[in-house]
Each structure stands twice: as C-alpha cells, then as structure tokens.
Amino acid sequence: MKTKDLENILTKNEGNDLDSLLDKIDERDFVSYLNGLIRASALSNAKIISLSNIERTYYYQILNGTRTPGKDKVIALALVLKLDLEKTNRLLKLSKNASLYPKIKRDAVIMYCLGNKYDVYKTNLYLLDHGYEVLK
C-alpha cells in the first residue's frame, strides 16, 4: 500500500478498524529493506561494491547491520540499484538519514541523476560540474 493511500485511510477514518490497518503497514528495517532491494536487482554483491565505490568490508557491515551508512553511501547504493526517488527516500529514512529535498541544490542534482538512472560516476561528474561535493 502506498504511503499516501495509507495516510488518506488513516486520516479520513473510512470505516476501517485501526488493527486491520496496522497489519498492512510494512515495518521492515533498513537492513531487510536494502537486502530485499538487492535481491530484486539481481546484481551480485561484488558488482554493487564495484559500482558504488563502497569499500568491501564496510559494505558487508552495512548488510549485516553492524554499520549504518551515511547519506552519501545510501545514495550511492540507490544509484547502483537504479531506485526511483520514492524508494531512495524510504531507504534514506530507514537509515536515519534526511530525505532528498528539491530545494537543496545538491539534493536537486542528485534527484535529477536518480531520475535519469545515472550511475555513481556520472552523478559525481554532475555534482562537480555544479560546484558540489561528490558522493563520499
């Protein structure tokens, strides 16, 4: 169920009881959500590591939940996995990072790159071309 649909049902109280609505909410944590996205992508871990420029040990620490990545690492993973903005922002929120916000120019560049399915390398070129720090 999409977030907006759930918001509408919850705020308009359309005759549904709360318990049945709560059962529909997907409460996956960051690690399980990321692992699900990786499985759906059919990319190998080695390929994701290579394309994301994330150090191998750090990547596996992210996957097993011993490290929580910063915003740039999550964005790099989103770019490699070719996620849309909605899934990227969900991944960011689950990792306790701020969502991408279009009125922040660096975020706007990243959003543009996500929308055009650019890879990390091309996204970093766009960030540099516009005077912003590359993804770290």
Image (cartoon, helix red, strand yellow):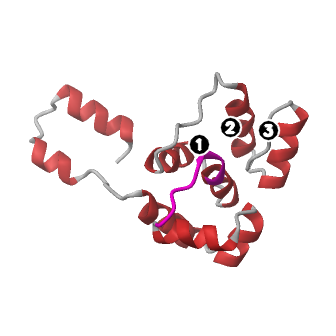
The answer to the question of whether label 1 and label 2 lie on touching residues, with beta carbons closer than 8 A, is: yes
| Callout 3 amino acid | Glu
Nearer the camera: disc 1 or disc 3: 3
Up-down: is 34 above or below 19? below
Tag 2's secondary structure? Answer: helix
Tag 1's secondary structure? Answer: helix
In space, the residues marked 3 and 2 are separated at their CA atoms by: 15 Å
Q: Earlier in the sequence, mark 1 or mark 2?
A: 1
Q: What residue did someone put label 2 on?
A: 111
In space, the residues marked 1 and 2 are separated at their CA atoms by: 7 Å
In the image, residue 78 lies at what x, y percent?
Answer: 63, 54
Q: What residue did someone put label 1 on?
A: 85
In the image, residue 66 lies at what x, y percent?
Answer: 47, 67
| Mark 2 crowdedness (10 Å alpha carbons): few <14, some 14-19, many ≥20 | many
Magenta portion: prevailing SS class: loop
| Callout 2 amino acid | Met
Residue at image coords 84%, 54%: 121
Asked if one can make out residue 119 in the rendered structure from this viewpoint, the answer is no
Up-down: is 65 above or below 71? below
The residue segment tinted magenta is 66-73
Q: Residue furthest right?
A: 129
Judging depth in this view, the residue of 87 and 72 nearest the camera is 72
Residue 108 position by quadrant: top right
| In this picture, residue 64 sits left or right of residue 9 | right
